[in-house]
Image (spheres, grey):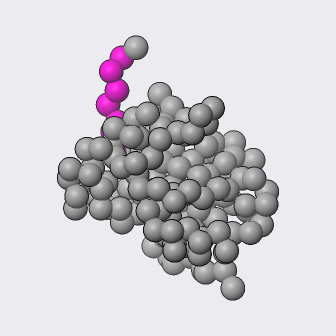
Amino acid sequence: MVARISPRLAAIVEALPLHPGMRVLEIGCGTGVAARAVCQRLGQGHILAIDRSAKAIDQAMAGSLPELASGRLAFRCVAIEDFVLAQDEPPYDLAFAVRVGALDGRHPQAGLVALERLRHALSRRGRLFIDGGDPLLEIRLDRAAG
């Protein structure tokens, strides 16, 4: 049985400024509940959901067979501090994270590395959101002009 989305997580997904066709990166996807909800909202867009836990990725994949088969959802076992775009992988339009220590201030050193990785993984106009606002907080990824 597919896990149901909690009201808190549903509110976070609903608050994301998603548009059909976007490329979205979820950081710390756990069992994939939010990734599946985002996938439903994106239409023909694409979401890559990452997590540092191989067990979480296995569970997420097992619960996401239709979305995986459609090609609109993919999972990768990697920490955000180690994330790099694959060769020929286009950048993402939006990234979001819920309870990820590298982005919510619990692990500041990891956060510096994570933000640098995200600057390279997101498009020039790409946006990053984390939980902690009402319900989201946007983190600015200041980039040098050019």
Residue 128 is drawn in which quadrant? Answer: top left
Position of 68 with respect to 141 (left or right) is right
Which residue appears at 47% of the width and 28% of the height? 124
User: In the rendering, at what x and y percent does residue 41 appear?
Assistant: 66, 56
Confirm whether the magenta stretch covers residue 130: no
User: In the rendering, at what x and y percent does residue 102 appear?
Assistant: 30, 56
The front one of 48 and 5 is: 48
User: In the rendering, at what x and y percent does residue 30 appear?
Assistant: 49, 70
The residue lying furthest to the bottom in this view is 1
Q: Is residue 117 visible?
A: yes
The front one of 41 and 103 is: 103
Q: Exactly how many numbered labels are in the figure?
A: 0
Look at the picture and state if 49 lies above or below 124: below
Bounds of the magenta segment = 139-145
Which residue appears at 75% of the width and 53% of the height? 71
Confirm whether the magenta stretch covers residue 142: yes
The residue lying furthest to the top in this view is 146
Look at the picture and state if 84 lies above or below 15: above
The front one of 79 and 145 is: 79
